[in-house]
Image (cartoon, grey):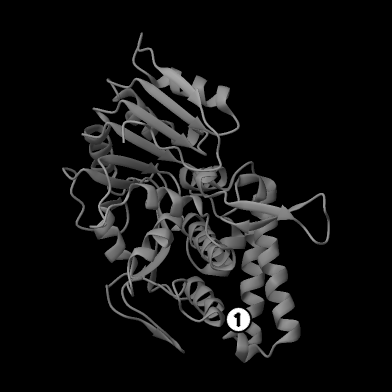
């Protein structure tokens, strides 16, 4: 079905880094999102930013009061502490999922089981980071190179392990007013684990979001109004809502159980069969595979093996990642026996587009 398949990892949203004004040996995120090694520092930067704005602005200008600001800082600090104790935040999420262990820091603060509390907190952090930093412009260049006048893309499949909305943010620029994410998902033919849209596996173009999305919707599909915050079925404050209201939304997502978190890791059973079936069907004809910023971590092994092992016609693998040899070895271990492919390393300044397009 798709002769070209992309796999996006965290490096696909890396963006740009600039020297830190306070320390030239350090780099600040000027565009995009943090990779694993940067996540703790990025979360701490949000805490410092909130503290700094409290110091120079009236709380009303932030859209939250003193107690709400203190709650936001304390919960973000919990996430930063967890990042310091584990190789990746996903590693700790998998541990909580398997053991059903109670992390008192999470359960006492967010009043739900530790696993769901961690995902809720992580989603809030990603939304704040995406609002604060400009998006990775490689998505804009990629979309502009492929989209036609009817907002159509060539036949291809994107398997995205990212729970960010960098692609959606870039694509939304092709609408005059539309910023409602479910509408964008419908146009992009997105299969999202936790928010089902009118996905059609027979269409030429599709995006499969393997980990869901770090967003929130209300469980009953109704609008929620909290203070000055009111919205439709899915939150869009980070698409043109006033910047000061982001803290109020972040606080609301953490404290109101009506908000349903749409982040769902690959190991969860939610729509697992639908995801696996869609992957198998879409990658069967793949000849060109492009890996962008994805290291094939073992926690995602099950889905990755389904994807790679079903690419029976695969001929070329383009890798856009500094760890070329490690990724090549991981892919080779998943290919059918005696299946030989050509591995090609590509620069990461723009998303690679194969000549077959």
Q: Observer-nearest residue: 39 or 77? A: 39
* Relative height, residue 305 to residue 44 (above, below): above
Q: Quadrant of residue 174?
A: bottom left
Looking at the rendered structure, the secondary structure element under dot 1 is helix
Q: Is residue 116 above or below residue 54?
A: above
Where is residue 353, by image quadrant?
top left
x and y, in percent, of residue 315 in the image: 34, 20
Q: Which residue is mark 1?
A: 68
Q: Report if residue 196 is visible in the image.
A: no
Residue 144 place in picture, x, y as percent: 38, 52
Q: Residue at x 52, y 45 (%)?
A: 10
Q: Residues within 10 Å of mark 1 (few under 14, many from 20)?
A: some
Q: Is residue 186 left or right of residue 235?
A: left
Residue 285 percent coordinates (x, y) = 24, 27
Question: What residue lies at 42% left-to-right and 17% top-to-bottom?
Answer: 342
In this orientation, which residue lies closer to the viewer: 70 or 191?
191
The furthest residue to the top: 338
Q: Is residue 321 above or below residue 230?
A: above
In the image, 69 versus 18, the foreground residue is: 18
Determine the image quadrant of residue 282: top left
Quarter the N terminus occupies:
top left
Residue at 70% from the left image edge and 64% from the top image edge: 45
Above or below, comparing residue 225 to residue 99 in the picture: below
Q: Position of residue 317 (x, y in %)?
A: 42, 25
Tell me if 150 is positioned left or right of 178 in this view: left
Q: Is residue 72 visible?
A: yes
Q: Quadrant of the C terminus?
A: top left
Question: Image point 82% across, 49% down: which residue?
Answer: 25
Q: How many marks?
A: 1
């Amino acid at each position: 079905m798709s002769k070209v398949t992309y796999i996006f990892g965290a490096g696909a949203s890396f963006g740009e880094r600039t020297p830190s004004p306070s320390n030239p040996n350090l780099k600040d995120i000027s565009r995009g999102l943090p990779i694993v090694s940067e996540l703790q520092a990025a979360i701490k930067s949000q805490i410092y930013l909130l503290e700094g704005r409290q110091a120079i602005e009236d709380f009303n200008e932030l859209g939250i009061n003193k107690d709400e600001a203190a709650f936001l800082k304390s919960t973000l600090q919990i996430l930063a502490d967890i990042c310091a104790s584990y190789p990746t935040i996903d590693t700790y999420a998998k541990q909580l999922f398997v053991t059903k262990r109670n992390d008192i820091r999470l359960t006492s603060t967010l009043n739900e089981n530790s696993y769901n509390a961690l995902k809720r907190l992580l989603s809030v952090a990603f939304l704040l980071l995406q609002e604060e930093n400009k998006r990775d412009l490689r998505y804009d260049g990629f979309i502009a190179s492929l989209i036609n006048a009817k907002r159509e893309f060539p036949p291809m499949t994107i398997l995205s392990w990212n729970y960010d909305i960098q692609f959606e943010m870039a694509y939304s620029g092709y609408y005059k007013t539309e910023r409602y994410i479910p509408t964008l998902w419908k146009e992009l033919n997105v299969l999202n684990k936790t928010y089902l849209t009118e996905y059609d596996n027979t269409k030429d173009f599709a995006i499969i979001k393997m980990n869901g999305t770090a967003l929130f919707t209300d469980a009953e599909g109704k609008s929620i109004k909290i203070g000055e915050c009111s919205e439709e079925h899915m939150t869009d404050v980070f698409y043109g809502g006033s910047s000061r209201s982001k803290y109020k939304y972040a606080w609301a997502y953490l404290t109101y159980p009506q908000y349903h978190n749409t982040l769902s890791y690959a190991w969860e059973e939610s729509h697992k069969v639908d995801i696996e079936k869609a992957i198998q069907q879409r990658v069967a004809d793949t000849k060109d595979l492009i890996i962008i910023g994805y290291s094939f971590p073992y926690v995602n092994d099950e889905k990755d093996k389904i994807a790679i092992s079903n690419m029976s016609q695969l001929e070329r693998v383009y890798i856009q990642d500094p760890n070329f040899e490690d990724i090549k070895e991981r892919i080779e271990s998943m290919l059918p026996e005696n299946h030989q492919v050509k591995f090609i390393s590509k620069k990461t300044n723009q998303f690679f587009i194969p000549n077959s397009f």
